[in-house]
Image (tube, helix red, strand yellow):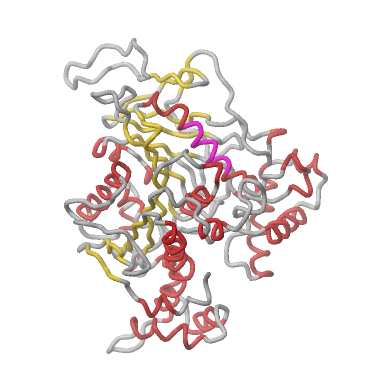
């Protein structure tokens, strides 16, 4: 709800001149108006995970007296700058990071009293980078164009959120391999309890995320503890394949402790965060090379009450099947990491590491990519193979797990080619985000789009499909037309490009070569 003393309206804009306030369970918040919406930022949804709470499951937020200033974003979770295009910058961080941000058309309910649909966004970044305040995630267009309340969250990253140290720290830390996911769960519980104060409907909540955020969406779908906290889900470039089992989880925890000099439990709890970050980075650099792990080391670890088994097995048994899902991947996911510049030797080494029959794996990709003017470059072949392995095939498998349980699933493929970096970016990982949020005109996005006309028509078409799904549970729109559900029988996929359209079972030969390589 909003304060009764909202203030007088500005005569020129007919907008209230005072700052908006909202009352939540912990106290009163003061936000700010901007771009025709209300923003409440830096709201704590859990107690600070500091001191004795480090490495523990999140605890309820603490109440406050008076009016809390919610006009500025809170700090990100502790993290080091990365080396990628989307992570190579410093961010303001603090171990006290469990906050969320809300963009709403208005804290009062719209005419008729019904609350607005809610979109809760979980950022990506390989569980080691990112924050909810990223400009690409600005929910203003969802609020103004779709009358939707948008929530973005921070959660613990790296070893602070995803390291199975329970055998070192004790039974009170049984969840530390998945605390970052439990932070997301706590944020959803807070939203359920408080979103009506911002004009949102707790019975119409969609969760969404990209990359590690999409992995998180799928893990939440698999968790019984999340049942009823959300009603629709969007997974962009991420499925339920990217976790560790208990054995790997303990091995990674051991590597982390070794990097720190195997401190006793009380010393580990008191170490400066900077020391933890440096140790995490060394594990990431050295551990993957030593063990051949294909994903970052600090990912969710299953094998306890909250996530008892591999999420793939839980999905196959029907977990999350009552929640409609919109999911998909980008054409050239791995181009974000420069794979398109790989050499012939790099490609050979990559394929040899994936299968005992490299020729069979390469054949369908060569058939498609090689042209009359000669073979495709090793880099683009590697990009196609890697993109399917890490993102495309897992997304299809997720849909297949859901199908026997009559789950509603829609699938897309984003194939708009960036003009940046001399054409070597293609439809890279994360490029679809500003299209779905309709933020393609935000400063800095042009670096990833490249020269030429801004693709506003595609951005609006995609954004409107996401709005339709969040509002009505179906991404069909007047522009895209009827978008049927995905099933293993016809495998209908919406191709999102300058010209959008449905594809029936796209590239079956390439999908088939992974039959016995990815479960």
Is residue 88 visible in the rendered structure shown here?
Answer: no
Pick the front one: 168 or 229: 229
Is residue 175 visible in the rendered structure shown here?
Answer: yes
Q: Residue at x 75, y 38 (%)?
A: 270
Residue 466, compared with residue 110, is above or below; it is below
Pick the front one: 36 or 162: 162
Question: What is the magenta segment's predominant secondary structure?
Answer: helix
Q: Position of residue 120 (x, y in %)?
A: 42, 40
Q: Position of residue 317 (x, y in %)?
A: 53, 57
Q: Position of residue 62 (x, y in %)?
A: 59, 23
Residue 34, compared with residue 158, is above or below; it is above
Q: Residue at x 68, y 41 (%)?
A: 55
Residue 333, compared with residue 54, is above or below; it is below
The answer to whether residue 44 is magenta is: no
Q: Residue at x 51, y 47 (%)?
A: 220
- Magenta-tinted stretch: 182-191
Quadrant of the rendering where the N terminus is positioned? top left
Q: Residue at the right extreme?
A: 264
Q: Residue at x 38, y 62 (%)?
A: 329
């Amino acid at each position: 709800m909003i304060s009764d003393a909202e203030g007088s309206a500005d005569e020129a804009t007919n907008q209230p001149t005072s700052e908006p306030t909202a009352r939540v369970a912990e106290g009163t918040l003061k936000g700010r108006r901007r771009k025709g919406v209300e923003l409440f930022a830096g709201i704590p949804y859990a107690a600070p995970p500091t001191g004795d709470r480090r490495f523990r499951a999140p605890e309820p937020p603490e109440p406050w007296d008076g009016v809390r200033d919610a006009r500025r974003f809170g700090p990100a979770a502790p993290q080091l700058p990365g080396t990628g295009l989307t992570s190579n910058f410093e961010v303001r961080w603090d171990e006290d990071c469990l906050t969320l941000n809300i963009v709403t058309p208005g804290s009062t309910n719209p005419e008729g009293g019904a609350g607005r649909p809610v979109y809760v966004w979980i950022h990506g970044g390989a569980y080691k980078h990112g924050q909810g305040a990223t400009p690409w995630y600005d929910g203003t267009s969802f609020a103004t164009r779709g009358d939707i309340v948008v929530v973005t969250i921070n959660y613990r990253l790296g070893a602070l959120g995803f390291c199975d140290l329970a055998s070192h720290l004790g039974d009170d830390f049984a969840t530390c391999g998945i605390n970052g996911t439990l932070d997301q769960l706590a944020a959803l519980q807070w939203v359920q309890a408080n979103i009506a104060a911002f004009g949102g409907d707790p019975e119409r909540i969609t969760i969404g995320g990209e990359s590690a955020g999409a992995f998180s969406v799928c893990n939440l779908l698999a968790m019984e503890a999340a049942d009823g906290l959300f009603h629709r889900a969007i997974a962009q470039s991420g499925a339920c394949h990217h976790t560790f089992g208990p054995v790997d989880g303990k091995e990674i925890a051991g590597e982390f402790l070794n990097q720190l000099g195997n401190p006793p439990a009380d010393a580990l709890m008191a170490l400066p965060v900077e020391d933890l970050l440096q140790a995490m980075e060394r594990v990431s650099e050295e551990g993957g090379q030593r063990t051949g792990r294909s994903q970052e080391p600090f990912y969710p670890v299953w094998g306890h009450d909250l996530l008892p088994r591999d999420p793939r097995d839980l999905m196959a048994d029907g977990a999350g099947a009552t929640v409609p899902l919109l999911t998909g991947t980008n054409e050239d996911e791995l181009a974000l990491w420069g794979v398109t510049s790989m050499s012939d030797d790099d490609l050979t080494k990559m394929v040899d590491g994936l299968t005992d029959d490299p020729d069979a794996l390469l054949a369908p990709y060569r058939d498609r990519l090689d042209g009359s003017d000669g073979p495709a470059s090793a880099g683009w072949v590697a990009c196609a193979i890697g993109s399917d392995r890490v993102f495309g095939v897992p997304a299809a498998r997720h849909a297949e797990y859901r199908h026997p349980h009559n789950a509603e699933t829609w699938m897309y493929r984003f194939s708009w080619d960036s003009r940046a970096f001399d054409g070597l970016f293609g439809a890279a990982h994360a490029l679809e985000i500003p299209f779905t949020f309709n933020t393609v005109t935000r400063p800095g996005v042009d670096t990833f789009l490249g020269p030429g006309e801004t693709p506003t028509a595609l951005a609006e078409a995609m954004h409107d499909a996401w709005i339709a799904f969040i509002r009505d549970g179906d991404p069909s729109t007047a522009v895209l037309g009827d978008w049927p559900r995905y099933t293993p029988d016809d495998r209908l996929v919406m191709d999102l490009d300058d010209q959008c359209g449905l594809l029936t079972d796209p590239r079956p030969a390439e999908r088939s070569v992974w039959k016995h390589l990815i479960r």
